[in-house]
Image (tube, helix red, strand yellow):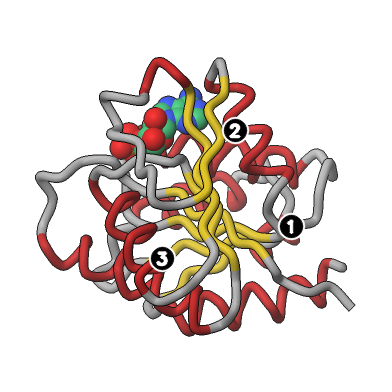
Amino acid sequence: MSKIMSVCVYCGSSNDVEPGYILLAKELGRKLAENGIRMVYGGGGVGLMGACAAAANDAGGDVLGIIPRFLLQKEQIFEAVEHRIVEDMHTRKQMMFDESDAFIVLPGGIGTLEEAVEILSWARLSLHAKPMAFLDEDGFWDPFFELMDHIIDGKFTPENFRALLIHADTPEMAITALKDNAVMLG
Ligand code: AMP
């Protein structure tokens, strides 16, 4: 049976967002730690990334940050947790994928979207069967799910892809859904 030991969290690096998003990131970090799940992420100390990692670390969870050298200052590497410094974005993304059994996508910007969509595109090509959940409390990701419905309704992506698209509104629900989908996909 598939087991979820490490979850990669994709999320925004902006500090300027509504406080509720930062609180959700902290809650997710705590829940991952409580569930004994290692958090893998982009290594920064800013925005939702830093909030989630600090909360997981404070709650006694394992955290692995992976950051490219050129972003060390811009994304303010969070040195309190295990981290790896890599040379480019591709290496970072591949390593985050390799180190994880599943993915949670918190609210974020273009970087978050790019990372999530690339992992979904690899699933579409059957390159992996690792589950992904989008997590928000306020419908932040609703437009993305509408776009995916539009794409699937147009038969550009097969109907069975819908089962891979999990939308959760609490960290607990996201973690449970990932475990259920890991069994289904595994
Ligand atoms: P953002 O959602 O734009 O705040 O970005 C969130 C994180 O995604 C940041 O750590 C960015 O460095 C990272 N990121 C941005 N573009 C890419 C990309 N093409 N591949 C992987 N990560 C990215």
Tell me the distance, in whole angstroms, between the alpha carbons under discs 2 and 3: 22 Å
Give the image quarter of residue 176: bottom right
Give the position of the N terminus as an image quadrant: bottom right
For label 3, count other residues whose C-alpha is less than 10 Å away and answer few (under 14), some (14-19) or many (20+): many
Secondary element type, mark 3: helix
Name the residue beneath numbered marker 2: 93
Tell me the distance, in whole angstroms, between the alpha carbons under discs 2 and 1: 15 Å
Whole-percent x, y for residue 147 in the image: 45, 47
- The amino acid type of the residue labelled 3 equals Asn
Among numbered discs 1 and 3, the one appearing first in the sequence: 3
Tell me the distance, in whole angstroms, between the alpha carbons under discs 1 and 3: 24 Å
- The amino acid type of the residue labelled 1 equals Lys
- Callout 2: CB less than 8 Å from ligand 1: yes
- The amino acid type of the residue labelled 2 equals Lys
Name the residue beneath numbered marker 1: 130
Mark identifier at residue 98: none
For label 2, count other residues whose C-alpha is less than 10 Å away and answer few (under 14), some (14-19) or many (20+): some
Horizontal side of residue 68 vs 161, given as left or right: left
- Residue 142 visible in the snapshot: no
Give the label, 2 or 3, closer to the camera: 3
- Callout 3: CB less than 8 Å from ligand 1: no
Name the residue beneath numbered marker 3: 57
Give the position of the C terminus as an image quadrant: bottom right
Q: Residue at x 69, y 78 (%)?
A: 179
Give the label, 2 or 1, closer to the camera: 2
Among numbered discs 2 and 1, the one appearing first in the sequence: 2
Q: Residue at x 33, y 68 (%)?
A: 55
